[in-house]
Image (cartoon, rainbow, N blue to C red):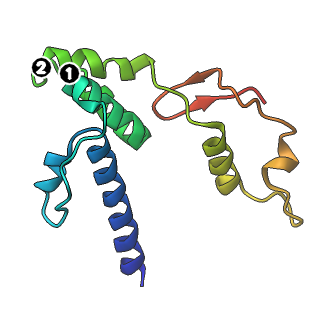
Amino acid sequence: MVSIVNAARNTERLARIATVLIKHGFGELVSRLPGLSRPTAAAAGDERKTFAVRLREVLEELGPSFVKLGQIVSTRPDLIPADVIAELARLQDRVPPMKPEEIEEIVAESWPEVGDGGGGVEAEISSVARTSLASASIGQVHPA
């Protein structure tokens, strides 16, 4: 049963990655992956963006693990072209913050219930600012 659930999650995640790649003009790459034959049309406007910009945008949209991968790759000028290094270096200190709704959902899901009567995050924190003070690949700071 667990393997079926894991397979479903993996399939959903793979579909999400493929969708983001196609959105940013990497449909040709997706069409070459086994079992993922999809149309190769790029999203409108992506033709004007460089490969490096589109790659950075894919990593940002796919989330913290992918941003971290981009940060690591940006430190390897011996392996990666200079234009890609320069663009991925933006992931070192200019990661866009997550939307407040996403943060609220993540905190609500992961905060343990307080005491026997429940209460969750609302019982511990009276308010959280919707605007972040800082954001990085694996964290974001909000005044509370």
Q: Which mark is residue 84?
A: 1
Per the model, the C-alpha gap separating discs 1 and 2 is 6 Å
Question: Which amino acid, mark 1?
Answer: Val
State the image coordinates of residue 22 (x, y, percent, origin top left).
27, 46
Q: In which quarter of the image is residue 142?
A: top right
Label 1 residue SS: helix
Report the quarter where the N terminus lies: bottom left
- Circle 2 residues within 10 Å: few <14, some 14–19, many ≥20: few
- Which residue is under mark 2? 81
Disc 1 crowd rating (10 Å Cα; few below 14, some 14-19, many 20+) is: many
- Where residue 89 appears, as percent x and y from the top left, is 31, 18
In the picture, residue 133 is in which quadrant?
A: top right
Name the residue at 83% across, 36% down.
127
Q: Do the residues labelled 1 and 2 touch (CB within 8 Å)?
A: yes
Q: Residue at x 32, y 52 (%)?
A: 19
The amino acid on which the numbered mark 2 sits, given as a three-letter code, is Pro
Which part of the image, by quadrant, shows the C terminus?
Answer: top right
